[in-house]
Image (cartoon, rainbow, N blue to C red):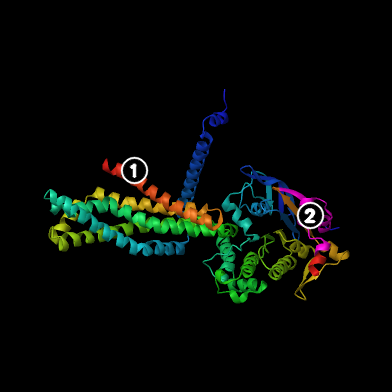
Amino acid sequence: MLGSSNESEAIPGGSCLLDFLTTLISSFQDFLFLAGRAFRNVVRSPHYYDDVFMQMDIIGVGSLPIVIMIGAFSGAIIALQMARALSTYGASSQVGTIVSLTLVRELGPVLSAVMVAGRNASGIASELGSMKVTEQIDAMRALGTDPIQKLVTPRLIATTLMLPCLTVLADAIGLVGAYLISVPLLRLISGGEFWSTAWRALVLNDLAQGLLKPFVFGMIISLVGCFYGLRTTGGTQGVGRAVTQAVVAAMVWIFVVTLLIDKVFVGL
Amino acid sequence: MAAPQEPILEFKDVSLRFGDTWALRNVSLGLSPGETRIIFGAAGAGKTTLLKAVIGLVKVDQGGINLFGRDVTSAGETALFPLRARAGVLFQEGGLFDSLTVGENVEYPLINQTANSQSVLHDVEGRVRDALRFVELEHTFDQFPSELSGGMRRRVGIARAVVTEPPLMLYDSPTAGLDPITANTIMALVAKERDVRNSASLIVTHRYQDGEIMSDFRYDQQNEDLVALKTGGDDAKRNRTKFIVMKEGAVVFFGTKQELEASSDDYIRKFVRHGDERQEERK
């Protein structure tokens, strides 16, 4: 009978595949371990409130311009595209309904999260990565500070609280963008009708998933950024690699989790 | 005859592997108050890993590490904080926090110690200024680390390490990449810290001169300068510096400076600057 190592040698690339899977599972385990400690620290002392507020300012206030811009343009684009499609069926009056549902359920949370991931997952990974390669993380541990408590938990709290706020803002600005296209520019419907249909289209289910998604995305973005930052090796080149990995992983996870949440809410 | 002092640090048959590479292989050593160990070795020989293992920054695979009477290998991260507070560490790059000023960097261990022990610490700024005065950098109190030169950052790192007056000091390549004048200034501070506070020191270095300064000189508080130790008499007893040479994670040499210089091993001789080389340098 052949041993397991012989079997993997017998299959071309078997050993590589095994190594790849082992690394993948081991990384995911490390990620869960980091996430567990970060969540546990939310209720454990010491609390670094100053760091939380500073991160809320960097992540929340700092992301306002891009989120406002993306919200406005996405609302306007949906209205423009939908106006043409709806007019084919003589349903131009429904533009408020379509824009409202699309923005609140899907595009608002996902586009805001993608923007914040691009801006903040990269920022977090590069900051923590630089600290790692210059031994600041080791220094922190040597001086009796838990880097997860000091660096990860404040970023987790800040991103998780700020992303839902940014998303609500992006949704509102998106509706304004859609209004400007639908009412003054294309004159599809009256202003009152636009806002009335947009508001009445939304039910509790839509609002719930529209708020749940950014809440979960906030956790993903901060934890992925911190995870890749804290495991950086190989000097400045390693920091660049960590940033790329953090942004790619955060974006992939955003779409995977969107699908999972959609599946749950569509079934409700 | 005075009883030998209890070691504050003990490595017992410690081993650690990263994949197929030995980072530490059956390392055993001890360190008592006032003693100095100079660690030489090629890049990747395990010197920095050994230093980090002392305070549990890396976990070893087997063996025991006893620090201030506590087992480091089985202690969790939080349980290690009080032990780490009693060890000052100078990292290779200084390890200063970019976002904090020099004053805040040096203040950090004091504030942290207060937070962990729930005690009230008086005159924090005074102690920070004292530590910066010790390394002759009090004027940099409000500056950021990025505004300092490499040697100055290293000296601020020493100030941060000594501000809590720890009984154990760990230095990771304190003179790496520095010009000879700055390197000698740094080593004078390291010797001063050892002789003024009688702290134990573990020094990783590539420069043989660093070992020579620690072995052949002592800090004279009256003249505020280093003075050469005489051979024989009280000065010989005062010399408590030993040398360690590491190769592929293992300790291949342990002994005095004279024993190191007398070694005929090719690997060990690479780290020794012999008399003829000194003559060359003087010319």
Q: Provide the residue designation for mark 1.
A: A260
Q: Residue furthest top?
A: A1
Q: What range is drawn magenta here?
A: B250-277
Confirm whether the magenta stretch covers residue B276. yes
Q: Secondary structure at mark 1?
A: helix
What residue do we see at 35% from left, 52% from top?
A215
Disc 1 to disc 2, C-alpha distance: 64 Å
Residue B185 x %, y % = 70, 70
Residue B265 x %, y % = 80, 50
Q: Secondary structure at mark 2?
A: helix
From the image, state whether disc 1 or disc 2 is nearer to you. 2
What residue do we see at 42% from left, 53% from top?
A247
Q: Chain of mark 2?
A: B
Q: Looking at the picture, which amino acid does disc 1 mark?
A: Leu
In the image, is residue B120 above or below residue A256?
below
Comparing B66 with B117, the one in front is B66
In the image, taking residue A218 as reference, residue B210 lies left or right, namely right
Q: Provide the residue designation for mark 2.
A: B269
Could you classify mark 2 by the number of other residues whose Cα lies within 10 Å: few (under 14), some (14-19), or many (20 or more)?
Answer: some
